Image (spheres, rainbow, N blue to C red):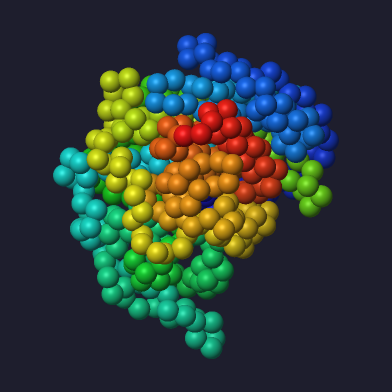
Amino acid sequence: MTGSITRRDALLRTAALASAGMIPAAPSAGIAAPLNRPMRNEEIDRTLQATVCAREIPGVVAMAANEQSVVYEGAFGFRDMATASRMSADTIFRVASMVKLLTSIAALQLVERGKLELDEPAGNIDPTLASAQVVSGFDAKGVPQLRPAQKPITLRNLLTHTSGFSYPLWDPTVVRYLKVARRNPSLPRMPLMFEPGSRWAYGGSLDQVGRMVEIAGGQSLDRYFSDHITGPLGMNDTGFSLTVKQRARQASLHMRDTNGKLLPQPLEEPDVPKVFSGGGGIYSTAPDYLTLLQALLDGGNLRETSILQPETVALMSENQIGDLEVGILKTTNPALSNDVNFFPGVRLRWGLGHMINIDPVPHGRKVGSLTWAGLFNTYYWIDPTMRIAGVIMMQILPFADRQALKAYRQFERGICHALGPA
């Protein structure tokens, strides 16, 4: 759910320059996809319209589908409150860590092809992972104490966030370490916070997986995605950079000030990256991303296009970490993220690409549903029991924004209510 530190720093700098003015957010009508003819659901429409009218969120696109077709599509509010440009179904969003699912799929494709193995040392593919150091503490002067990892990092560790890598945004130990490491170039830039396999922490593991995909697949990550995932599925609005025409459809970021007011930000400068992250930095649309979810919902296939074998998709959906607790994140920077606890009281685990709820969510998804999110408040879920997948996209900071989560929950409940008992 996080891009590079420089990007986050840039976002904070632009926030200081934002205009204090805000145009009232009148909703646009829900937009139906012409080919799939999704159902109209007045309850969901009214809920999302009301959220926008109350200026709780600037704009939103929400969609849900079964394996064959889209069952709901709605677009409400504005892409940019400063210009009053309307949200539409084809609006492009920065989906940040939702690229992690594509990276996981890419790695598992290579497992299927025998190019990678889940439980071999990742250092056999990427030598930079072969001699990991673990932070065991700090001495009396605040100097980090490091020791060699006792176990090798594996691809399974990386895909399940049990590698030891942890993001500074939700880990004060990483923040403390980096303050020292920036002044001491002899210290490793990305040490482990714990022994591989011993804990769960959300961090840069999928960046490492992305590099492994490039090495084992023999292509840059963007080209691999295009050739093996997004291209075959027709996800033409998903990628690491935008054309001029795509940029005209991009939603602007909105940041909350200390009073909760939404402040529109200028779009980031156009960029064609030379290095591609497996953990963040991608753009997509709700229809594109829902296409990916539909393929997974149908065992890796969509309209005669196969991206994974059914047994691999099933493996992605299984708890891979035993009784390790996941999902609760305490922020170190409230401007970028609130504390995260999506499902209080619900036991959560991790598969090979998704978070899994092993208890039902009241009025929502069933046991064994799959989910994750992006830093700018984009979210998805797959419910294999109800045979439904959903995606909801906004562009707001901080992450886990309370009003964005409210819209997400109301959308999910509306879909589950419309479908009735499984």
Q: Residue furthest front?
A: 421
Q: Is residue 29 left or right of residue 100?
A: right
Residue at 62% from the left image edge and 48% from the top image edge: 399
- Residue drawn at x 64%, y 30% is 60
Residue 269 in view: no
Residue 296: which quarter of the image? top left
Q: Position of residue 8 (x, y in %)?
A: 59, 50
Residue for point 48% across, 21% down:
70
- Looking at this view, name the residue that lies furthest to the bottom: 140
- Percent position of residue 251, x then y: 62, 30
For the residue pair 383 and 206, the one nearer the viewer reads as 383
In-image side of 288 versus 198 (left or right): right
At 58% from the left and 46% from the top, the residue drawn is 362
191 w.r.t. 256: above or below: below
Q: Residue furthest top?
A: 34
Percent from the top left, x then y, of residue 411? 61, 34
* Left or right, residue 349 beside residue 379: left
Camera-side residue: 116 or 68?
68
Give the number of marks.
0
Between 58 and 301, the one lying in front of the other is 301
257 horizontally vs 107: left or right: right
Q: Is residue 190 above or below residue 298?
A: below
In percent of width and height, residue 363 lies at 59, 42
Comparing 241 with 97, the one in front is 97
Does the rendering let one see residue 95?
A: yes
Image quarter of residue 150? bottom left
